Image (spheres, rainbow, N blue to C red):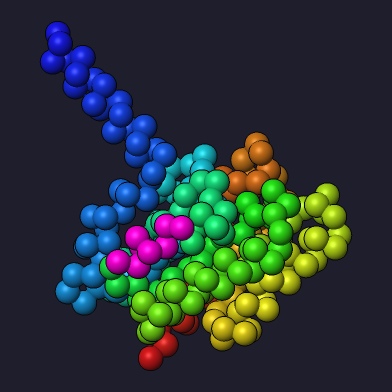
């Protein structure tokens, strides 16, 4: 009986730890991603990438992996999306992700900054830090920046200034911009969960198709 209880509490701890620090589970994928000729595509994001409210297999990064496989492209997607992450949180865990080779990075962070009304300069600085540190560690890595928009109730000036961060960063760093990650999904009840923030399974399929139109040319470029 004592052994059974000990096993139960150990198992419970491991489950809770994995929920709180889900990105640690990426280690096997990071190792496999760079074996042989396979190249690694890291998605550094928040709940929109982590697949909040849907099965992880239905989230858009998993669907991108299916597109890559279907086209015979030797890429492995590492989904480093963590629900609730801000740009500052992304910077804090970036070094861990950069320990293994990164051939391409989709940077999908900023929505939580905006929804919390965080200082815009901090958001811009953090996103730039991710770009700079990725390029320093892996100079040949292709970087794709996913733009975000905010609801109007955040205030017109804040909303417009927030949205302007993404195209400005893409232009100054000469990286590919997805103007709005949730194009055709945001604000559409039929493509979102009850919170009207996170895509449902159908919404994720639309997001994946949208991302793919920008991502595929980048990955195929010589």
150 with respect to 35 (left or right): right
Magenta extent: 92-99
Q: Residue furthest right?
A: 156
Q: Quadrant of residue 176?
A: bottom right
What residue is rendered at 59% in x and 48% in y?
199
Please provide percent x and percent y for residue 49.
Answer: 50, 54
Residue 94 belongs to the span the image colors magenta: yes
Q: Is residue 157 magenta?
A: no
In the depicted structure, whether residue 135 falls above or below residue 93: below
Q: Position of residue 178 (x, y in %)?
A: 60, 72
Q: Is residue 157 left or right of residue 84?
A: right
Is 186 above or below relative to 20?
below
Which quadrant holds the C terminus? Answer: bottom left
Viewer-closest of 76 and 127:
127
Q: Is residue 107 visible?
A: yes
| Point 73% across, 56% down: residue | 150
């Amino acid at each position: 009986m004592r052994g059974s209880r000990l096993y139960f509490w150990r198992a419970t701890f491991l489950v809770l730890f994995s929920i709180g620090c889900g990105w640690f589970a990426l280690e096997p994928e990071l190792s496999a991603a760079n074996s042989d000729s396979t190249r690694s595509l890291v998605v550094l994001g928040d709940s929109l990438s982590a697949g909040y409210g849907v099965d992880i297999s239905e989230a858009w990064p998993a669907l991108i992996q299916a597109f890559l496989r279907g086209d015979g492209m030797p890429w492995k997607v590492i989904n480093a999306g963590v629900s609730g992450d801000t740009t500052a949180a992304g910077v804090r865990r970036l070094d861990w992700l950069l320990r293994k080779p990164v051939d391409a990075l989709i940077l999908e962070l900023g929505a939580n900054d905006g929804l919390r009304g965080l200082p815009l300069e901090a958001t811009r600085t953090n996103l730039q830090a991710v770009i700079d540190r990725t390029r320093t560690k892996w100079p040949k890595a292709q970087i794709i920046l996913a733009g975000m928009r905010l609801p109007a109730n955040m205030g017109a000036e804040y909303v417009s200034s927030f949205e302007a961060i993404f195209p400005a960063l893409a232009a100054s760093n000469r990286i590919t911009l997805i103007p709005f990650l949730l194009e055709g999904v945001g604000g559409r009840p039929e493509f979102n969960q009850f919170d009207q923030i996170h895509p449902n399974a159908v919404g994720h399929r639309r997001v994946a198709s949208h991302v793919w139109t920008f991502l595929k040319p980048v990955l195929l470029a010589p």
